[in-house]
Image: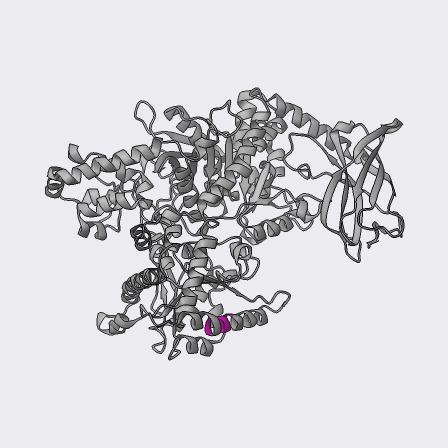
Amino acid sequence: MRAIRRFTVRTVLPEALAPLGELSMNLRWSWHPETQDLFRDADPGTWEAVGHDPVALLGALAPERLAELAADEGFVRRVHDAVGDLHEYLTGARWYQSLGSGEPGDSAIPASIAYFSPEYGITSVLPQYSGGLGILAGDHLKSASDLGVPIVGVGLLYRSGYFRQALSGDGWQQEHYPVLDPDGMPISVLREPDGTPVVVTLDLPGGRALHARVWVAQVGRVPLLLLDSDIETNEPSERTVTERLYGGGNETRLLQELLLGMGGVRALRAYSRVTGAPAPEVFHTNEGHAGFLGIERIRELVADSGLTFEEALEAVRAGTVFTTHTPVPAGIDRFPRDLVAQHFSGPLAPPEALDQILALGAETYEGGDPGVFNMAVMGLRLGQRANGVSLLHGVVSRGMFSGLWPGFDPSEVPITSVTNGVHAPTWVAREAQDAAERAGGARDWEGLSRLSDGDLWQVRRTLRGKLVDDARRRLRASWLERGASEPELGWIDNALDPEVLTIGFARRVPSYKRLTLMLRDPARLKSLLLHPERPVQIIVAGKAHPADEGGKRLIQELVRFTDDPEVRHRIVFLPNYDIAMAQVLLPGTDVWLNNPLRPLEASGTSGMKAALNGGLNLSILDGWWDEWFDGENGWAIPTADGVSDPNRRDDIEAAGLYDLIESQVAAKFYERGHDGVPQRWISMVRHTLQSLGPKVLASRQVQDYVNQLYVPAATSARGLGEDLKGARVLAEWKRSVRGSWDGVRVDHVESEGVGDAPEVGSVLRVRAFVSIGALQPGDVEVQLVHGRVDEGDELADTAALPLTHAEAYEGGRHRYDGELTLERTGAFGYTVRVLPSTKLAAAPAELGLVANAVAPEGQSKGAPPLR
């Protein structure tokens, strides 16, 4: 018999223990060891049974136990000390407050920043994530909280989360979707002053409506608003919109993204109205899924401020930051254009704005599909500032999206980069923190790096032993779920070995991450696993998308190898990779393996977490590792760049991987001194902690976002004026420039001063004669672009020198002059170009307009080499 309704009845705490309720509902406990200890000590057995979930713990404690605790003066004192510490954390000034007041009149820092993401990985008891994007978003909010950055997160509440992964008897991935009860999670309903739940509504085609309740998860100082469509006012089809993360077909996914973006803005407005929190000045879109937030903000401005669509677009762009995480076009959400048009043909859009909305997501570049609406393209057009998530990914992104800025070199495409980071208090193991503190250091990577060689090695052994115990437990549960019986599983008691070199590999399972690269030569792998003096053991985990049959086949191939009785004690696959598993797996591995197909790993962060615990990375030079590998903090797997045959490339790179493990990794690990400590290994561990520790932190990442993107975005938005007059002026200026640009050209360029044999120190004097039509000199910048040239006269490593307006002629012609001292030898070239120019632009290429000089037929654009 099935229940027609389910809910969780929360316990009523004795008055002396009432602060436990507040402590359980603020997710700071998930990275605060002292608060975790408090809940554990309430009942250690129950704490383990509920999976370290404070809300579940309080609900499971018997009234008699609560009474005992309430009568325990020492425990009650700890409860009140803990809540006092939380209050100080929530209200005290932190790093962000040192930058300025945050008040609207303070030009230094924004008073509030909205952060939109389709998923958030904060703690395993709030399973609203599928992989790295969500974990990154969770770490972003946690670090923002620690730094005092006034972020408000926005997402969706998925009643079935992503999925729970299990394996069939033959190793095939199976998905299970447990129903989550919001009343049993550390979240609360956002309510109006009269106590009724806040509900946001989107009008849909055909007279339908999509309603969503707003839940709030408190992530330290940061509120996270989660929209939930599973409410009774919705029709059945709309109730399931937020059922599953990345679930359903095109229409369900579109509705999810409309609710996340447009509904999210409405939820923010309700949150500010109900709580008095300042309205966000900056909107950060974490991937394209939330891009419709820009359409909603345009709709607001058209309705409330009387702006035209174009004027509202400029106001929205100024305060919007867009982050792309995708290194391949196939990873971008693209919807049928007609489907998007159908949903914006009614009240969701400003009046008569359908064509302008569709243009935002149009693939207008060469090779683009006119029948699709591209969410990343819309994100770039709606955000004045954009970034990739590592230096290499910034390069890849500029190349991938360069078609949106024709006439510019990829290096000039206005997409910067902020390399990802991880939240150290979440990911540095408790055992490592405690050891660092006992030695008088900080409870983090820095304190860990100051331990003696022997003590640091002992920490590594402890973490490896904990991982082996956890892996055996999970392995037994998996085999039982696959149909094995307990008497068949005695071998698991000796599976893995706490003294053996342990390699970890865990991530999502798209093909480019190459889960099975290690299997290219099974005999070679077996020889490494079973080496008599220097054995290796490998622990693997990861989920394939439910619709990815290829990914599931890769998992099955690996599982079948791990089932082999000859090696199953040395290599295991653990199903259902999640935060709880990662918090044991990442610290416990000696080496973290990552072997994607370069350059398809945008950033990656799992190896960062391993590094903060003293793990060494063994990785393809991709993502963050390409940026920070220094030859002493791990190993770089050689890449077969330029090999077009994918099978041959995999064979070459797998061979390189095997060679590194055998000749370098295992050799160093098992090279022991008289005290049993591998001195050279520990030296690499210490160097890793010291060199990577400061770099891989999410606190560094968030500070970079504040300084490089949030503050400039707030400054741009404020520069438009409270009455948004600047938006009107900017929109009119852009309309004028675009309308006149066909008349802009470089007519003629003259130079002197270098002769036929220029030398370093020679002065190149340039006069450029340009036509700018109806535009004024202040509307443009004329630049001398110079740099190295190749045999085809293509410029590289360029720099731009603005030329000075010297003279105006009739017919819109002007002369611009400039001088350049030649400072380097080699093949040198230059050109002249004209760009639109306004102080309200964030980058020279922002408008995508440029008039480049054209060399006369048969004449080189370069100059003779320097001597």
Q: Is residue 263 visible?
A: no
Q: How is the image coloured?
A: one colour
Above or below, 657 relative to 442: below
Residue plotted at (19% across, 47% down): 41
663 displayed left or right of 191 = right
Q: Is residue 704 visible?
A: yes
**In the rendering, at what x and y percent does residue 384 appear?**
60, 36
310 displayed left or right of 211 = right
Q: Which is nearer the eye, 7 or 575?
A: 575
**In the rendering, at what x and y percent does residue 550 appear?**
48, 63
Q: Looking at the image, how many numbered discs can be counted on the residues?
A: 0
Residue plotted at (36% across, 33% down): 233
Above or below, 227 relative to 695: above
**In the rendering, at what x and y percent does residue 212 appear?**
39, 35
Quarter holding the C terminus is bottom right
Determine which quarter of the picture holds residue 848.
Answer: top right
Dominant SS type (magenta): helix
What are the residue bounds of the magenta stretch?
657-662
**In the rendering, at what x and y percent does residue 577 appear?**
37, 57
User: Magenta span has 305?
Assistant: no
748 displayed left or right of 553 = right
Determine which quarter of the picture holds residue 82.
Answer: top left
Residue plotted at (67% across, 51% down): 367
Above or below, 457 relative to 248: below
User: Magenta span has 661?
Assistant: yes
Q: Which is nearer the eye, 560 or 778?
A: 778
